[in-house]
Image (cartoon, rainbow, N blue to C red):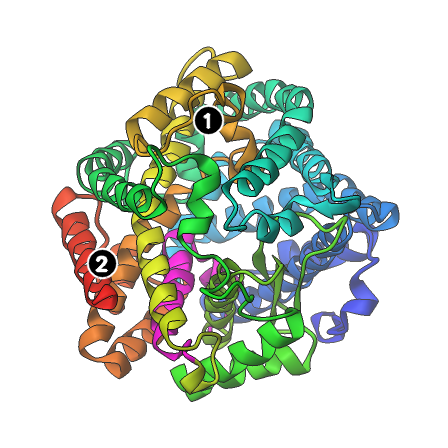
Amino acid sequence: MFSTLPTDYHVFLSWTWADIAPYYQDLNARSLNADTVAAWLSDWTRIGKTLGEMFSRLQLASTLNTADAAAEQYYLTFLSDVQPRVEEAEQQLKQKLLASGLQPAGFEMPLRNLRAEAELFREANLPLILQGRKLGQQYNKIVGAQSVTWQGQEVTLQQLRPIGLSADRSVREQTWRLASDRWLADRAAINDLWRTAVPLRQQIAHNADHADFRSYSWRDRQRFDYTPENCLEFHAAIEAVAVPAATRIYDRARQRLGVSTVRPWDLDLDRNPISLDGRPPFKDGAELMAKTATVFAHVDPQLGEYYATMQREGLLDLDNRKGKAPGAFCTEFPVTRRPFIFMNSVGLRDDVRTMLHESGHAFHVFETLHLPYIQQLNITMEIAEVASMAMELLAAPYLSDRHGGFYAGADYAQDRIQHLERIILFWPYMAMVDAFQHWAYTHADGDDPAACDAKWVELAQRFMPGVDWSGLDDALMTGWHRKQHIHRSPFYYVEYGLAQLGAVQVWRNALKDQAGALAAYRHALSLGATKPLPELYAAANVKFAFDADTLREAVELIESNIEQLKA
């Protein structure tokens, strides 16, 4: 029956569980032994990819237009009527394979992961997990509806950002406060979601015999190669190494601006998010797409062809618009064998970096197409984010207009400086987000928004002492509202910090040998999820690390390059 499984997503996108169930019933009924396991895994992969594409396309439709009630209903119907039954059926197949004792070649890591998933599964959690996904959808709707009026025109908060780059400090402050007030208008709604989400997540953990949601998340996110204590070590390393470096950056900004302290509305301007002459690096998504294609053709011909394929096949939705969900991501259509990039560009330097970042994820998809089984594609974010963050750095030499890129003359050097400074500034913020979640799920008052507000202020004082928030208490303490990962993908953030450290090491190698670094990078991506994290990092010729010494080497390399670019 698997030979008739459709490959056109238009056919299976509206499938119900009744259409899907026979494939799982067939797999569960088959005899499983050394002679049949390869074909069995291949067919399991085929139905798994079909469902993966259903989920990706339905979720994408609901984010492209959060006001599309029909798209939202299709997605929620999938989550409520199909997904729980799929998870039950998947659990049966995992148990069948594990009970067989078979060890297929190249399946060592997938078996480890499947064993962990099977141990974590509880039928009682299925409706709770569904409820959690719906809460994430509600957060999306709240944020996707945010807009303000600027000079008589309605604009999204993303569209307000370029206006907030004015050389006039009073305009910057006005736009910043306007956006902040709009977030605060949703304070009660987001707090209500949080009061529901945290106990729900803790109940999921308790149902699975874990003490708290942090412990549960460690297994759920398949973190076999590091512990919560390693994260706390990383926080301490960041406090010791990256926070002083970030404070130096803020102090230089203060001196250049000629102000007594750096305020939140000063941050973007000093890093020149547009260009030295006030013009954006691109005018719209079409130009962003075209220039990025030219950049990737210089980085590597094969990567350039991957990107060109996405252009030809309409696999990029780049421009911001009202009703579009916030953020940026790369999703995958497993049956179609293609990635898709979603983002909200408005003509900023950040948008160029986001484009490079999400393209790194897309290249990861292309590089793993050769792997035969879906379980070998269960790539964790610690290596997935190396793919994206390293691509930002590997592409950097080609962003000059001399290579058909985005920046001319001094703007190119300025962009490189901005990028490198932001890497340093990111680590303290990442530590705030991660430390907040460690606290929220290991303390009894983690579901209390007032306690969360107080904790966020404490963390800001620890990790971001160089920014002056005086008189902005409400905006400061609700900073945790504005980080969507906290609300939609709990505990998914430290991966960015770890991967950034890996990416800087890839860049270090590229400074000595760009071609060699790129070859190692692509090799690591091609391994998918077939090796443990330390080995995947080693394949890219970098170290998987949490310690202050490795971080110090990275920060010193960044700071020395910043000085060279300034000179």
Q: Position of residue 189 (x, y in %)?
A: 69, 23
Q: Which residue is mark 1?
A: 213
Name above or below for residue 197 compared with residue 325: above
Query: Alpha-carbon neighbours of circle 1 within 10 Å: few (<14), some, or many (≥20)?
Result: many
- Tell us which disc is closer to us: 1 or 2: 2
Disc 1 to disc 2, C-alpha distance:
36 Å
Q: Quadrant of the N terminus?
A: bottom right
Residue 95: x and y in percent read 52, 46
- The residue range painted magenta reads 371-400
Please identify the dominant SS of the magenta region: helix
Look at the image and tell me whether residue 287 can be seen.
Answer: yes
Residue at image coords 39%, 49%: 496
Q: Which residue is mark 2?
A: 558
Q: For the residue marked with disc 1, what is the amino acid?
A: Phe
User: Which sits earlier in the primary sequence, circle 1 or circle 2?
Assistant: 1
Q: Is disc 2 placed on a helix, strand or loop? A: helix
Quadrant for the C terminus, please.
Answer: bottom left
**Magenta stretch containing residue 398, yes or no?**
yes
